[in-house]
Image (tube, helix red, strand yellow):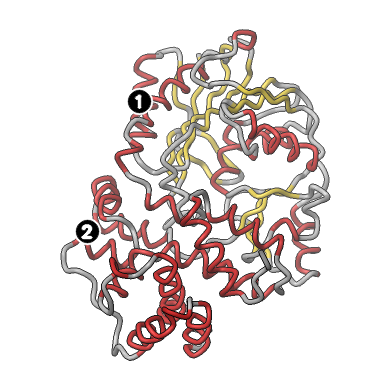
């Protein structure tokens, strides 16, 4: 199949691939961009269009429903109309004629007149259609989340705070890098990125993080050399909470793709041993290849079900990272399709998480540190699991922690609207 020659054509291909094959948009996008010959500006437009159309699908379909019958539009044409209306409604820098004309040119011949008519009808509207008046319908259309997820967030945080969090998870967050201090330092990386025309800002809390403008991180100077890797500041804070020291034995129970193991190894000055486990053997290569690029030699990978401890390490570990599988409702900003998960499908997660937490605790020596974390903001996956664990395991207790100059409660939920990070939960515990 020939590579698309325009940004919109490539965006359409990625969107159709996501719809037909499932999977995460960031992976499909990266695969297509690696094969593309588009320049940097067009690649940035592709990224904006793909993530924007997926993120705003509910809103876009609401707009389209005011102009045509959704059920009568074939899937490929509907995707193309969404692509056009997204540009008209949300991208100020895209000329309307470009959005309409290229959308029409990408349509099958039989549908070009229809696509043209819908887009031009949208352009003639005096204002965007008003959202529904009921509270959940309003949130759903304004921010493009299913009503059941809006209701769940409202139950958790109250309507006003829920709206703030939902709004904060829309848009394109910056890419956050964790500098590899085995090889360099933050100031040096920041300088050479600036010299290459890339703005980088220090993270607010992590002393080794940089926020950079949107773009393909793998193409940045220093990536191949292992000067940094991608890790959100919330995850960096979690790794610092662990407090790993040189010479210790660390176990990372659910480690792929490996960022917390990498951070721990760097904080240990690459001295000691880290056992990085994951249920899926095919994911271990991500950790192994990442460690090699970063110059880390103390990580051993193991394919293992974290719900059962590995017998040889029971009572041996100084510290344990227990970053459990979760609903992902804190990282919607980076993986917009997560918002369309069936909420009912996540209801069995707390039991799995609790079983993993119980198994992880068995690895610790007396006095050892246990960090339980998720990338969700729901109490049933976070605080509820920790409270139950502490009640049933009185030899563990909560302990506050600090990262840089900032102090954190032993149980901390980082939220996108206030901390400007992923939604993330950290519980810092110690064994008596």
Q: Quadrant of the N terminus?
A: bottom right
Q: In which quarter of the image is residue 116?
A: bottom left
Earlier along the polypeptide chain: callout 1 or callout 2? 2
Label 1 sits on residue: 387
Q: Is residue 70 left or right of residue 423?
A: left
Q: Is residue 275 left or right of residue 306?
A: right
**Circle 2 Cα neighbour tier, 10 Å, few/some/many (<14 / 14–19 / ≥20):** some
Against 385, is 145 above or below? Answer: below
Q: Where is residue 148 in the image (x, y as percent from the top left)?
A: 26, 50
Against 46, is 320 above or below? Answer: above
- Total number of numbered labels? 2
Label 2 sits on residue: 136
Q: Where is residue 102 in the image (x, y as percent from the top left)?
A: 53, 83
Tell me, for residue 378, which label it has, or none: none
Q: Which of 202 and 286 is in front in this view?
A: 286
Q: Position of residue 222 (x, y in %)?
A: 80, 55
Q: Position of residue 282 (x, y in %)?
A: 64, 32
Query: In this view, which residue lies farthest toward the left?
Result: 134
Query: In this view, which residue lies farthest toward the front?
Result: 110
Q: Secondary structure under badge 1?
A: helix
Mark nearest the camera among 1 and 2 is 2
Residue at image location 33% in from the left, 68% down from the top? 61
Q: Nearer the viewer, residue 315 or 356?
A: 356
Residue at image location 45% in from the left, 73% down from the top? 80
Against 40, is 406 above or below? Answer: above
**Circle 1 Cα neighbour tier, 10 Å, few/some/many (<14 / 14–19 / ≥20):** few
Q: Secondary structure under badge 2?
A: helix
Residue at image location 47% in from the left, 44% down from the top? 424
């Amino acid at each position: 199949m020939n590579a698309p020659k325009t940004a919109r054509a490539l965006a359409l291909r990625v969107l159709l691939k996501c719809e037909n094959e499932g999977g995460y948009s960031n992976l499909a996008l990266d695969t297509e961009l690696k094969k593309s010959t588009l320049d940097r500006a067009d690649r940035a437009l592709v990224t904006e269009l793909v993530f924007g159309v997926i993120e705003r699908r509910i809103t876009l379909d609401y707009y389209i429903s005011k102009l045509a019958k959704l059920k009568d539009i074939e899937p490929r044409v509907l995707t193309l109309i969404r692509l056009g209306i997204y540009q008209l409604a949300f991208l100020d820098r895209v000329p309307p004629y470009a959005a309409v004309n290229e959308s029409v040119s990408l349509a099958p011949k039989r549908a070009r007149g229809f696509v043209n008519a819908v887009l031009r009808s949208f352009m003639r509207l005096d204002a965007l259609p008003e959202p529904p008046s009921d509270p959940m319908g309003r949130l759903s259309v304004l921010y493009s989340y299913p009503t059941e997820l809006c209701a769940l967030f409202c139950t958790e945080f109250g309507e006003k705070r829920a709206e703030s969090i939902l709004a904060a998870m829309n848009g394109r967050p910056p890419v956050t890098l964790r500098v590899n201090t085995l090889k360099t330092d933050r100031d040096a990386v920041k300088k050479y990125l600036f010299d290459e025309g890339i703005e980088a800002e220090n993270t607010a809390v992590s002393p080794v993080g940089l926020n950079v403008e949107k773009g393909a991180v793998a193409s940045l100077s220093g990536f191949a050399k292992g000067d940094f890797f991608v890790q959100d500041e919330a995850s960096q804070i979690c790794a610092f909470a662990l407090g790993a020291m040189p010479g210790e034995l660390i176990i990372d129970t659910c480690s792929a793709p490996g960022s917390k193991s990498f951070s721990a190894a760097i904080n240990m000055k690459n001295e000691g041993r880290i056992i990085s486990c994951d249920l899926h053997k095919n994911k271990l290569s991500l950790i192994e290849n990442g460690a090699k690029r970063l110059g880390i030699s103390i990580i051993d990978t193991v394919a293992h079900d974290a719900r059962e401890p590995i017998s040889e390490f029971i009572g041996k570990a100084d510290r344990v990272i227990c970053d459990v599988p979760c609903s992902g409702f804190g990282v919607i900003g980076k993986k917009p399709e997560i918002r369309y998960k069936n909420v009912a499908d996540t209801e069995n997660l707390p039991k799995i998480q609790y079983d993993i937490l119980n198994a992880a605790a068995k690895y610790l020596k007396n006095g050892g540190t246990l960090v339980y974390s998720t990338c969700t903001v729901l109490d049933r996956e976070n605080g509820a699991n920790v409270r139950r664990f502490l009640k049933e395991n009185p030899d563990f207790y909560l302990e506050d922690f600090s990262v840089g100059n900032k102090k954190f409660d032993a149980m901390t939920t980082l939220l996108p609207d206030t901390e400007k990070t992923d939604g993330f939960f950290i519980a810092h515990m110690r064994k008596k």
